[in-house]
Image: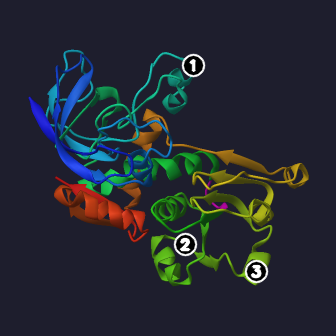
Amino acid sequence: MGYRAFAATVPGGRLEAIEVEAGALGAHEVDIRVTHCGICHSDIHLIDDDWHISRYPLVPGHEVVGTVRACGPAVTDVPVGQRVGVGWQSGSCLACEWCLRGDEMCCAHQEATCVGRPGGFADRLRVDSRFAHPLPDALASEHAAPLLCAGITVYAPLAADVRPGMRVGVIGIGGLGHLALQFARAMGAEVTAFSTTPDKAAEAQRFGAHHFIVSSDARRMEQARGTLDYVLSTVTAPLDWPVWLDVLRPRGTLGIVGASPGTVSVSPMALIVGQKAIRGSAIGGRAAMRAMLDFAARAGVRPQVEVVPLRDVNAALAKVRANQARYRIVLAG
């Protein structure tokens, strides 16, 4: 029996309603009735084939929330009726050194939810049950969806490097940044928000920032030099990387989750003096995902969302393309 999905049939094209043939349920698979799916900029990159990995027709969507409606014979971890969330990753070998240490996102055989297979802009989703994460009751489905990609993307590096009392900066107050501010504040950090948009000051403070700096203000940036223990870049715009290294205190770390264009070019001495570090991060393993969901539920971390009917997916995508979403758009079936 098939199900309805919305797919791009050519690079950059409008999404069209199609019928997807489900086929037999695999041994470890669950069939999920999708209720909500967040829109991420990665979905747009896939629609446009910016990464040259897309196959058409392409059904995007990797911030998926729904209810398990059927289980394969080997499924033991999620029962029928369980509300679950599925993020970017939907499979790995589960046997290599990276999987065994909980870093499934580093597995050479990792699988993505909407690359080479239909994603969550659909009525249903088939996925390995071991990558379908039970959702805490305290998280509404429309709030849980963006946490499954945007949330884990910022939580994983913060959880690894930030401790209570540290002074943390977040570059960019957008879909990722507004969650990073909340997580960092909830982790006990003193939080500074950096943005090129002055009118985001009040919102940044509402999300948890103690301080707000307009990053194009040279005087304020000079005052910020040597003040922070950790800075997380969430933006996709070009950055003057030596400036951000200068903001760090000795032994500080610059974390990068936003895919800014160009190269990260810094002098080796900028790292050696002060023993500073630059570290990249992408999503997190299964244990980190479940820890993030529990932390968000307990700490009150919630994305600011606009809920749009799935049938209006093209209008929603246009809004995300125009950077008009504040701060995440979630499709509801």
Q: Is residue 122 magenta?
A: no
Q: Earlier in the sequence, mark 2 or mark 3?
A: 2
Q: Amino acid at mark 3?
A: Ala
> Disc 3 designates what residue?
218
Image position of 93 (left or right of 119) = right
Q: Residue at x 35, y 67 (%)?
A: 319
Horizontal and vertical percent position of residue 265: 79, 53
**Circle 1: element type:** helix
Q: Nearer the viewer, residue 282 or 265?
A: 265
Q: Residue at x 44, y 44 (%)?
A: 49
Q: Earlier in the sequence, mark 1 or mark 2?
A: 1
CA–CA distance between discs 1 and 2? 38 Å
Q: Is residue 164 magenta?
A: yes
> Disc 2 designates what residue?
209
Q: Nearer the viewer, mark 2 or mark 3?
A: 3
Q: Amino acid at mark 1?
A: Glu
